[in-house]
């Protein structure tokens, strides 16, 4: 892969350096009002600027995690009509699509499927950071933005068939973050797995059917 970082911007800024571990949160269409998206965009602009100044990202851990908690709190309070992922048929479809790409397009680390969003952690070309889970050597060189477009396009089409509906299924972009080191990776995986616990769905993350981790946590 190229050594040059890939930048992508629509409403939110996206920074995709090669050979990295990514934390991505795709959410359902209509799950965030426009004003909230603008607030998150402003916060992400600030974080993005600081991350570029500090490649290790050490000073940005607290700010990122506060931003993430804020996003989840907003998503927990949205209109329940935007919670198609609470349908087990749709959750199963998304889980299968995520797992299908493991070893082909990315090295899957963890995910949790919530009623209106998905937390997903995967790596591409980073054996030192995710060596405990076994780095894949024959991954495609597809950019993260293309991987997510493919994943969302397929699941949107199939989910709409199941639900008998038309129109946008996913928000057109995802919230994302580049994981800088193994300590941050462990914290984020724990955060992802405990999302259903914090939401009150289960008492132990292992009881949530739509969670997965390749790390021992």
Image (spheres, rainbow, N blue to C red):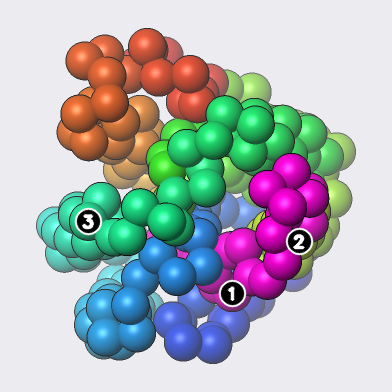
Q: Which residue is mark 3?
A: 77
Badge 1 density bin: few <14, some 14–19, many ≥20, Cα 10 Å: some
Q: Pinpoint residue 189: horizontal percent, then vertical percent.
A: 37, 34
Query: CA separation, marks 1 and 3?
Result: 20 Å
The reply to whether the magenta stretch includes residue 170 is yes
Which region is colored magenta? 157-178
Question: Callout 1: helix, strand or loop?
Answer: loop
Which is closer to the viewer, label 2 or label 3? Answer: 3
Taking the image as shown, residue 99 lies to the left or right of residue 173, namely right
Query: CA separation, marks 1 and 2?
Result: 10 Å
If you read the primary sequence from the N terminus, does the residue marked by circle 1 or circle 3 appear first?
A: 3
Q: Pinpoint residue 43: horizontal percent, then vertical percent.
A: 23, 79
State if disc 2 and disc 1 touch (CB < 8 Å). Answer: no
The answer to whether residue 130 is above or below residue 133 is below
Badge 3 density bin: few <14, some 14–19, many ≥20, Cα 10 Å: few
The answer to whether residue 74 is above or below residue 33 is above
Taking the image as shown, residue 71 lies to the left or right of residue 185, namely left
Q: Pinpoint residue 90: horizontal percent, then vertical percent.
A: 63, 38
Q: Is residue 102 visible?
A: no
Q: Which residue is mark 1?
A: 172
Viewer-closest of 135 and 92: 92
If you read the primary sequence from the N terminus, does the residue marked by circle 1 or circle 2 appear first?
A: 2
Question: Callout 3: helix, strand or loop?
Answer: loop
The reply to whether the magenta stretch includes residue 79 is no
If you read the primary sequence from the N terminus, does the residue marked by circle 2 or circle 3 appear first?
A: 3
Q: Image quadrant of residue 36? A: bottom left
Q: Residue furthest front?
A: 164
Say the numbered circle drawn on residue 153: 2
Viewer-closest of 116 and 198: 116
Query: CA separation, marks 2 and 3?
Result: 26 Å
């Amino acid at each position: 892969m190229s050594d040059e970082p890939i930048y992508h911007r629509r409403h939110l800024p996206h920074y995709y350096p090669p050979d990295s571990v990514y934390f991505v949160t795709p959410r359902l269409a209509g799950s965030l009002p426009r004003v909230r998206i603008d607030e998150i965009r402003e916060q992400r602009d600030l974080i993005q600027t600081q991350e570029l100044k500090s490649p290790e990202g050490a000073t940005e851990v607290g700010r990122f995690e506060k931003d993430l908690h804020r996003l989840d709190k907003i998503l927990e309070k949205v209109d329940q009509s935007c919670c198609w992922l609470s349908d087990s048929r749709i959750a199963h479809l998304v889980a299968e699509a995520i797992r299908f790409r493991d070893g082909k397009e990315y090295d899957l680390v963890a995910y949790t499927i919530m009623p209106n969003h998905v937390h997903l952690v995967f790596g591409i070309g980073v054996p030192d950071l995710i060596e405990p889970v076994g780095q894949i050597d024959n991954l495609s060189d597809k950019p993260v933005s293309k991987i997510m477009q493919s994943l969302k396009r397929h699941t949107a089409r199939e989910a709409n068939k199941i639900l008998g509906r038309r129109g946008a299924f996913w928000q057109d972009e995802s919230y994302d973050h580049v994981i800088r080191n193994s300590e941050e990776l462990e914290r984020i995986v724990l955060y992802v797995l405990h999302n259903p616990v914090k939401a009150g769905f289960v008492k132990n993350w292992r009881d949530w059917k739509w969670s997965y981790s390749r790390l021992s946590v």
